[in-house]
Image: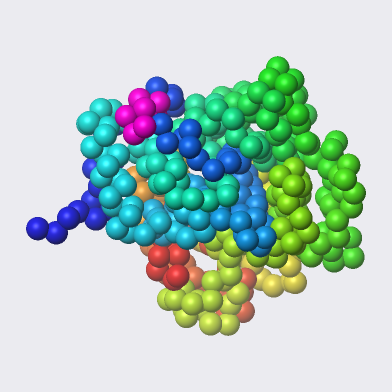
Amino acid sequence: MTAPGSDVILARMMALHPKIIDLTLDRVWRLLDALGNPQETLPPVIHIAGTNGKGSTQAMIRAGLEAEGARVHAYTSPHLARFHERIRLAGALIAEDHLTALLDECYVANGGAPITYFEITTCAALLAMSRVPADYTLLEVGLGGRLDATNVIGRPALTIITPVSMDHEAYLGDTLAKIAGEKAGIIKRRVPCIVGPQEEAAMAVIEAEAARLGAPLIAQGQHWHVWEERGRLVFQDESGLCDLPLPNLPGAHQRDNAGAAIAALRALGRGAAALEGAVTRAHWPARMQRLTQGPIPEAAPQAEIWLDGGHNPAAGLALAQHLATLPPRPTHLVCGMLNTKDIAGYLAPLAAQALSLTAVSIPGEAATLPAEATAQAARAVALEAHTAGTALAAVQRIAAHSPHARILICGSLYLAGGILRENG
């Protein structure tokens, strides 16, 4: 009889708790204890929270460390095409047989007790990382920070908080200060914390929590600065000035993410090769990623097709600002979103950069916003709006009317994941 693969075990894990999200650490601590507390034997941990930019920042830090020859574990979520993307061991994505054995071990150790999918798979990632030698472990928070399943490291080497903005209000709170309080929950006593650019309300909460715990803050605008000058990235802190190439990840917001990554690498004592590697070698899919192969690009061979998984107002603003810097070209959006998101806040800044929006429902997602609802939201911000059955059909429709268009598929990482599976 063939042993079940990782997809089968992951499906079983989905049934262990009636809720997808249920923020508490009790179940995580119970399972980690049953597994021998692997979180206590990880290589030095860099723990990253924030609303936007934490994945890109993690990718830059990993690129920088690996440029100097370091072996790096990395844990991130959600995945786009395959679950294996979430767990990187000493630089390589986890292999299928390894993942299957690991998931099965955790499933058995859990003994059928209630636990969410994210909690049990995070425990599996920590177990894997504890068993493979490496120099660093990069942990990206899934949701919030204080009660996130990754927040089980007693003394990380470093914590990082990227920009905090409104998102997931149903779980984290309905004000920026409340959300910042949840993110600041990863700060640990006397452990340095790198802080990206923040609104005043968020920064006040982060500063108060750091002061309470005696954690040194290394904050943008206070302890480090980053800017573009003559086509270069300039970073300055108390140790001096660095002149580097611009980040290879597109968008002005990536300068701030690069700044946080550089500040982290400097705090870890890494050298010039790490700083340059961070900005030149990072790869992070579905963040203004150019699509060049697969059915969608083939359907519009003269068009310029991009994919972005940002899904909240801050992401919409960053995306609009980046579009404004690109060479003039008729720009059209293909958009699908979840019904838990602030669609009006996301679309409002994009309306000034696009001629139209074609709305799609996200295939296979129960929480998708129906295409017509997305179209109605687009019309409310003065965007010409249409609907299509699939992203491919949307692209074909746009290309028929504007063959040389710039087409941006956007609105959700879940939509982006489906696009990458079909066009990877």
From the viewer's side, name the closer residue of 329 and 236: 236
Task: Confirm whether residue 1 shows in the render.
Answer: yes
The residue that appears at 19% across and 54% down in the rendered structure is 4
Determine the residue located farthest toward the top in the rendered image. Answer: 212
Quadrant of image for the N terminus = bottom left
- Position of the C terminus, as image quadrant, is bottom left
Residue 29 falls inside the magenta stretch = yes
Whether residue 43 sits left or right of residue 192 in the image: it is left
Q: Position of residue 274 (x, y in %)?
A: 71, 58
Q: Which residues are magenta?
A: 27-36
Residue 290 placed where, x, y %? Answer: 58, 70
| x 53%, y 51%: residue | 134
In the rendered image of this protein, does residue 224 appear above or below residue 59?
Answer: above
In the image, what residue occupies the spot 34% across and 34% down?
Answer: 35
Q: Is residue 354 visible?
A: no
Report the residue that reaches farthest toward the left.
1
Q: Is residue 134 magenta?
A: no
**Colour option used:** rainbow
Q: Compared to 236, does 416 lie above or below?
A: below
Q: Residue at x 56, y 56 (%)?
A: 71
From the top left corner, tell me how far across and down residue 395 is, in percent.
Answer: 49, 70
**Foreground pick, 245 / 252:** 245
Residue 183 sits in which quadrant? top right
- Quadrant assignment, res 209: top right
